[in-house]
Amino acid sequence: MLERTSVVNTVKVNSASFASTIQLGDSRIINGFSRALAVQREADVFYGKEGNFLNYSVFSEPIPLLPITEKMTISTHNLLPIIKVNNISILAMSSSAILHVGNSENISLEARVKHIRQLLHAEDEQ
């Protein structure tokens, strides 16, 4: 793996949450993984089965990774082995987000979210 020095003058991140990573410098492998249930309710009614990830296929279905079959030719010429960044300002990072300044060999990121809306029946609203 190509090694370079990463120089960053200023990094300001207000909020980094839920499997987010801030990486300055080279890395061989970056794996980010996040899963969440987002429940929106009209009333505070709990059915008891919302919190189990195994109840929803979105968390267990395999993600198809299609092979890259296109021919690629890459030619790089680095005069200096330095990555220079002046300022980075980020308001918020969430759900397996990565801020990375440097070289990476393998990167894999995955975020799965199940959105659930629980609405009241017409007879429940009275």
Image (cartoon, rainbow, N blue to C red):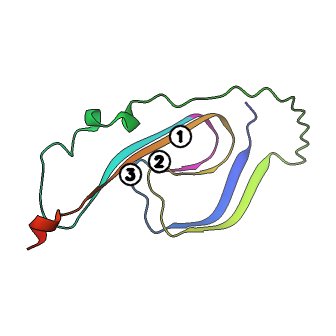
Look at the image and tell me in which quarter the C terminus lies: bottom left
Mark found first going from the N terminus, 1 or 3: 3
User: Circle 1 sits on which residue?
Assistant: 109
Q: Which residues are magenta?
A: 21-29
Q: Nearer the viewer, residue 47 or 22?
A: 47
Disc 2 residue crowd, few under 14, some 14–19, many 20+, Cα 10 Å: many
Disc 3 residue crowd, few under 14, some 14–19, many 20+, Cα 10 Å: some
User: Circle 3 sits on which residue?
Assistant: 18
Contact, mark 1 vs mark 2 (Cβ under 8 Å)? yes
Residue drawn 39% across the image and 30% down it: 60
Q: Nearer the viewer, residue 46 or 51?
A: 46
Q: Is residue 58 left or right of residue 86?
A: left
Name the amino acid type tagged 2: Ser
User: Circle 2 sits on which residue?
Assistant: 96
Per the model, the C-alpha gap separating discs 1 and 2 is 7 Å
Q: Nearer the viewer, residue 125 or 98?
A: 125
Per the model, the C-alpha gap separating discs 3 and 2 is 6 Å
Which secondary structure, mark 3?
loop
Q: Nearer the viewer, residue 33 or 57?
A: 57
Q: Position of residue 43 (x, y in %)?
A: 15, 66
24 is within the stretch colored magenta = yes
Q: Name which quarter of the figure residue 9 lies in.
A: bottom right
Look at the image and tell me in which quarter the N terminus lies: top right
Residue drawn 83% across the image and 30% down it: 70
What is the magenta segment's predominant secondary structure? strand
Which residue is situated farthest in the bottom direction here? 126
Q: Is residue 42 above or below residue 32?
A: below
Contact, mark 3 vs mark 2 (Cβ under 8 Å)? yes
Q: Is residue 42 left or right of residue 45?
A: right
